[in-house]
Amino acid sequence: MNRLNQLLGTEFPIIQGGMANIATGEFAAACSNAGALGVIASGSLRSAEELREQIRICRERTDKPFGVNLMLMNPAAPEMAQVISQELVPVVTTGAGNPAPYIAAWKAAGVKVLPVVAATVLARRLVQAGADAIIAEGTESGGHVGEMTTMALVPQVVDAVEVPVIAAGGIADGRQMAAALALGACGVQVGTCLLVSRECPIHENYKQALLKAKDSDTTVTGRSIGGPVRVLKNKMAREYLALERRGATLEELERCTLGGLRRAVFDGDVTTGSVMTGQVAGMLHEIRPLRVIFQELYTQGLAVLGKTCRDWEEKA
């Protein structure tokens, strides 16, 4: 099996998730310098030139491999896809749509293509279109989510495709890293555990809200309109869910969340803002450097795998 770090040229087999409004060029560079693959998020950018600027910022701050996450729902996605090729970005991850129309151009430019999927049917289709690897993301993750859990999704994707598979969703410590590798993944993508890193550019209130979170403190909004999003339970989330239960219009629902993520990230509004986070928020207990988070994930993951094998061999 190809290890993710061998595929990407990174120290650790870990990808930083493309979190909108958070994963800037500077943060992606910090993640790459810490040993993972840093990824610039395009979801909150308004133009292809804004993306080009973030790529430039990232390159100024690291000589390590990095990537761009192309949010295919972004109206500027076609132009951004061209910038990724023009700038010879080493890796592209994709979400919220089908990247097949862009894959040939990316491959021609030497870009490694890693789409994020929530079901095996799309994984098969994208491998046929030329994807180099697949990121299988379970519903435990923060932000936009699918329905299948990581535990159920990853082995089915592994069995369905002939390319490396990366596990995402619900991974915050070495035990979960070990579980992902045991399911057949070649590495992991993480996001929630990085929100409480020292280098993460979110407001301090956001970080503190996550540090206080318990295991059942997230919920999923937007199921009624086909756009499920996992967030921390707060006043905004409760109001949104109440609107969904009474059959509110799309306009009413959009008004409830308008600008919510930006308020949480930049203003520290964790009451009426959209505090996107995965279910592992309850496992976050302190603010640490990125390097420590990545190193612990990897070393503890290998240690857990080794200890589990030894324990079961002794009992056999």
Image: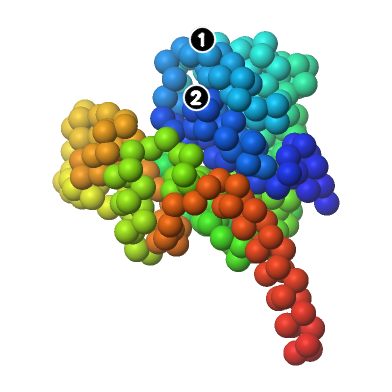
Q: How far across and down, in percent of the image, does residue 154 sit? A: 64, 54
Residue 40 at what x, y percent from top left?
55, 28
x and y, in percent, of residue 253 in the image: 23, 35
The three-letter amino acid code for the residue at tag 1 is Glu
Which disc number belongs to residue 42?
2
Residue 313 appearing in the image: yes
Numbered mark located on residue 2 in the image = none
- The quadrant holding residue 118 is top right
Question: Residue at left 26%, top 33%?
Answer: 267
* 56 in relation to 260, above or below: above
Instruction: Say if 165 sits above or below 265 in the image.
Output: below
Q: What residue type is labelled 2?
A: Ser
Mark before the other along the chain sequence, 1 or 2:
2
Task: Report the residue at 61% width, 20% height from top.
Answer: 60
Query: How many C-alpha atoms fall within 10 Å of the one at disc 1: few (<14), some, or many (≥20)?
Result: some
Q: Which residue occupies the foreground of this view, 137 or 146? A: 137
Left or right for 22, reference 86? left
Q: Residue 49 carries which label?
A: 1
Above or below, comparing residue 166 to residue 149 in the picture:
above
Residue at image position (44%, 20%) is: 45
